[in-house]
């Protein structure tokens, strides 16, 4: 429209339609923060890596336990070693030497252990 067709008035200003912009923003929000959004996928990937590492560690523990079970079933030396270490057992002809615990010198004490200066000596 020209000015002469509109009766001398200026043309009305063009208004920006907000609906398409709001729709795009809404779709972008769902794509980022939705249940299957990008952020959720990243978080799931991290969680998967942590769980894989835990499974690997647990498989190592299981393998070690299986080896120990097999040794307990078949290895007499292993059983004897456990009996000596954990139960304090000895053979009939062995001699046991027990030494009294030695006292720590000032140089061997931990740094956090400070003698009390107020006690009489």
Image (tube, rainbow, N blue to C red):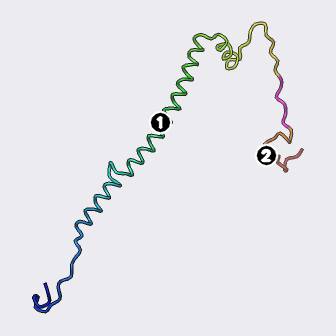
Q: How far, Cα to Cα, is label 2 from label 1?
A: 42 Å
Q: Quadrant of residue 2?
A: bottom left
Residue range corresponding to the magenta coloring: 99-104
Q: Quadrant of residue 21?
A: bottom left
Instruction: Check if residue 101 falls in the magenta segment.
Output: yes
Hey, which residue is sitting farthest right in the picture? 121
Neighbor class of circle 1 (other Cα within 10 Å; few <14, some 14-19, many 20+) is few
Mark 1, secondary structure of its residue: helix
Q: Residue at x 56, y 14 (%)?
A: 70
- Foreground pick, 116 / 23: 23
Instruction: Check if residue 117 falls in the magenta segment.
Output: no
Residue 30: percent from left, percent from top: 30, 55
Callout 2 touching callout 1 (CB < 8 Å): no
Q: Main secondary structure of the magenta part?
A: loop
Q: Residue at x 83, y 46 (%)?
A: 115
Residue 106: percent from left, percent from top: 86, 42
Residue 66 image label:
none
Residue designated by label 2: 111
Q: Quadrant of residue 24?
A: bottom left
Residue designated by label 1: 52
Up-down relation of residue 3 to residue 112 (above or below): below
Neighbor class of circle 2 (other Cα within 10 Å; few <14, some 14-19, many 20+) is few
Mark 2, secondary structure of its residue: loop
> Which quadrant is the C terminus positioned in?
top right
Labels 2 and 1: the sequence-earlier one: 1
């Amino acid at each position: 429209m020209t000015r002469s067709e509109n009766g001398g008035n200026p043309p009305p200003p063009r208004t920006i339609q907000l609906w398409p912009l709001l729709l795009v923003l809404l779709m972008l929000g769902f794509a980022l923060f939705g249940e299957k959004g990008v952020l959720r996928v990243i978080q799931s990937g991290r969680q998967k890596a942590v769980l894989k590492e835990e499974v690997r560690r647990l498989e190592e523990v299981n393998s070690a336990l299986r080896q120990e079970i097999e040794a307990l079933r078949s290895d007499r030396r292993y059983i004897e070693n456990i009996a000596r270490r954990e139960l304090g057992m000895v053979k009939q002809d062995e001699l046991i030497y027990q030494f009294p615990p030695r006292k720590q010198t000032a140089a061997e004490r931990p740094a956090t252990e400070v003698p009390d200066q107020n006690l009489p000596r």
